Image: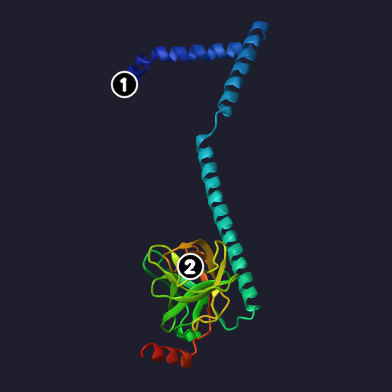
Amino acid sequence: MKTIGLFLLQIKEYIILSLLAIISFILIVSNDNSQIRFLRAAAVGFIGTVQSGFSAVPNVFEIQKENEFLREKNIELSNEVSALKEAKLENIRLTKILGLKQTNISGVVIAKIVNKSLIQARNTITLNVGESDSVKVNMPVITDDGLVGRIVSTSRNYSIAQILYNRSLSITVKVQRSRVDGILNYDGSGNLMINNVPKSADVKTGDLVLTSEYSNFFPAGIPVGVVTEEGNLDNLFKKVIIKPSVSFPGLEEVFILRHLPDNERLDLENAYQKK
């Protein structure tokens, strides 16, 4: 009890102040004087203003949660847009495939590219089809835009094709407009060139180049590219550079033609060249 008394004695000023505040509040509330009513109204108005001011201050935590929700929705919508774009592109590719099947080219194997090189002297693509899909060495590889290359190696489920940008691949081609013949090769430094074109041959920039009927490996009439540069290489031949019809950097799917060279003709020509 003595300790409580000492404690109360120490805080007597606070106790007296609290009692006086309570008494003042009671007197103000019970008093109906006009001045007191004015003070009460002013106090209520001040408290209301302060409260409304605090309510106008944004809730930081709520805004943060809302931002996180909006970011998640934005990511979901972005993914949906990407999926729709891919579906649209696939639909375009499938439409082109159907169009290709309606042409006179029959026996087409559809393949996806699973690997490719475009910066070497002998560039290739790896396809997800192989011997189990009836794919064989020397079958031509094309797209709906034109010639891609030729199958050079196969396994049960995969195959490798040389593409136009491969120094080991030579293709007999023809200028569609003037019927000028030549041999298409990659020079290893970024250019596809038609060799053995006589200086006097009628070849112009913009001419379309097709596979020739003289080729034993490719069906005639497949678009190869367009002449972008022509000029005199020396006193005998022209320098003819073409841009391929196929865009190799964006290439994802190809068609393999079930077309094989005539072995009898191939053996005869090879035997004659060895004489």
Res. 48 image quadrant: top right
Where is 18 relative to 133, above or below? above
Label 2 CA crowd tier, 10 Å (few <14, some 14–19, many 20+): some
Q: Tell me, yes or no, whether the two marked residues, 1 and 2, touch with CB atoms within 8 Å.
A: no
Name the foreground residue: 176 vs 89.
176
Name the foreground residue: 27 vs 211.
211
Where is 98 relative to 262, above or below? above
Q: Percent from the top left, x then y, of residue 118?
A: 41, 65
Q: Residue 3, labelled with which disc?
A: 1
Write the residue at 52% across / 69% down: 201
Residue that carries the numbered disc 2 in the rendered image: 199
Write the residue at 57% across / 74% down: 179
Q: Percent from the top left, x then y, of residue 6?
A: 32, 17
The residue type indicated by label 1 comes to Thr
Residue 245 appearing in the image: no
Instruction: Say which quadrant the C terminus sits in.
Output: bottom left
Q: Percent from the top left, x then y, of residue 145?
A: 57, 69
Label 1 CA crowd tier, 10 Å (few <14, some 14–19, many 20+): few
| Left or right position of 33 against 81 | right
Q: Percent from the top left, x then y, of residue 245?
A: 54, 66
